[in-house]
Image: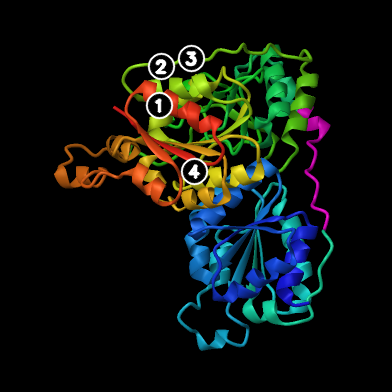
Amino acid sequence: MNGAEALLRSLVSSEVSTCFANPGTSEMQFVAALDRVPEMRAVLTLFEGVATGAADGYARMAGKPAATLLHLGPGFANGIANLHNARRAHSPIVNVVGDHATYHQRFDTRLQSDLSGLARTVSAWQRSTTRAEDVGADAAEAVAASYGPPGSISTLIVPADVSWNDGGVPAPPQAPPLRPVVPPETVEGVAKLLRSGERAALLIGGDAMRERGLVAAARIAHATNVKLLCETFPARHERGGSLPEIEKLAYYGEMATAQMAGIQRLVLAGARAPASFFAYPGKPSDLVPEGATVHLLAGVGHDVSAALDALADAVGARADPPRPRANRPDRPTGPLTTESMAAAVGHLLPEDAIVVDESITSGLSVPAATAGGPRHDWLALAGGSIGQGLPAATGAAVAAPGRRVLSLEADGSAMYTLQALWTQAREGLDVTTVLLANRSYTILQFELARVGVSGTGARATAMLDLTRPDLDFVSLASGMGVPAQRATTADELAALLERGFAQDGPMLIEAMLG
């Protein structure tokens, strides 16, 4: 057995059964071995950023890693932006990166690079295998390491001769480490301060954004005077139905400051202390209220939901907090605006949908419009690097067959990884993309004023404008095999959403926002 087959069999043994791939010459042995290891599903992508973003979306929904197959340093570099997002989302991913044969590397040929240096920027675990006999065990270790806690990125570099040499030995899975439990004394200390009468806020994130953590946090808020908030961009947020709704910490620093005004104690559970997304002239980066003290209940690597359960019991919270009632918006008619678009989504969102949100400014009204809808998952832009939405929707659909994925995608960020549509068509994935076309980088127009720029002229304005020529997403999607139509009114959008949610396979709706 050669090294490539041993690698594949070791991944499958460790329950890594999906690989998002963009292979090259150094990965051909891996490609050939796929025919001998049919348990591995290989999904071809046309750009490495799609492969890594899809692996992120897959991991968030499956709760286990996918593999990526990347080509040398340049291929890995193409995927780094979405690996950054995955790192911030604590998604477990195993990158398999082909390298030049060990004896060939000394010639420093055109594609030679500092692959280890590149991998180090986003990987919590990395290794370059030098023998076919070791690659199976290294793969099993990479999978175990990707679980963290918290979840993280493992990168296994495999020289071409390690793949084609005989002597490969499949390895059994390694048990991933358990999440540490928060000590009882920590829980009791936080309970004491919540009972003190001082104004406190509880900021949650990580696995606390799932049902168990949300219910526990709502119990705590109902039993105390604590203000309940969650991180701005959760990796996976279970919402809707009878689940407690939670207020997100605002993106803009001024709004976040207003949310926490008067807070004397800030308790963190799976979230970091709030800081401004960017630095702005004359404005603070630290968003913790002046004079407030920060208390850590549970870090992101802990069993956060268990800690919140324990805290709820410690403050004497009732077993089941009040639950929200269903409250969908009416079906919209008339002009297509950001508000009517949000109403259409809220009115029609299917039960058990997965929403992948990279709508940037155009989707600001959608969370409120969907809060009272049926139960669904919400995947946010955890790392802030745009180009995640279409790939993450692709990976989420692979991870959760039978569930409808709704991809809310801004036009500017869509152009980063538009190739994901081709993979959706090839794989027949149930993804409905609402492409929000406002023909500009609107978020950057806001940021111009926030960094103190005024009086911008035509040349500066042109850098934020997506016209001349206009992007035609109906043609772009159709050219990659995804059925697409354009909506210019709220009525048209609602009708197309109904069609997209009902049919099998992908569909793109270009929503022309007025």
The image shows residue 295 at horizontal and vertical percentages of 65, 31
Q: Label 1 is placed on what type of residue?
A: Leu
Q: Secondary structure at mark 1?
A: helix
Q: Label 3 is placed on what type of residue?
A: Pro
Q: Could you say which disc has been placed on residue 493 in the image?
A: 1
Mark 1 in CB contact with mark 3 (< 8 angstroms): no
Mark 4 in CB contact with mark 2 (< 8 angstroms): no
Give the residue pinned by disc 2. 332
Horizontal side, residue 361 vs residue 355: left or right? left
Horizontal side, residue 391 vs residue 34: left or right? left
Q: Could you say which disc has been placed on residue 329 in the image?
A: 3
Earlier residue among tags 1 and 3: 3
What residue is at 63 percent from the left and 77 percent from the top?
159
Q: Secondary structure at mark 2?
A: loop
Callout 2: few (<14), some (14-19), or many (20+) C-alpha neighbours within 10 Å? many
Which quadrant of the figure has residue 299? top right
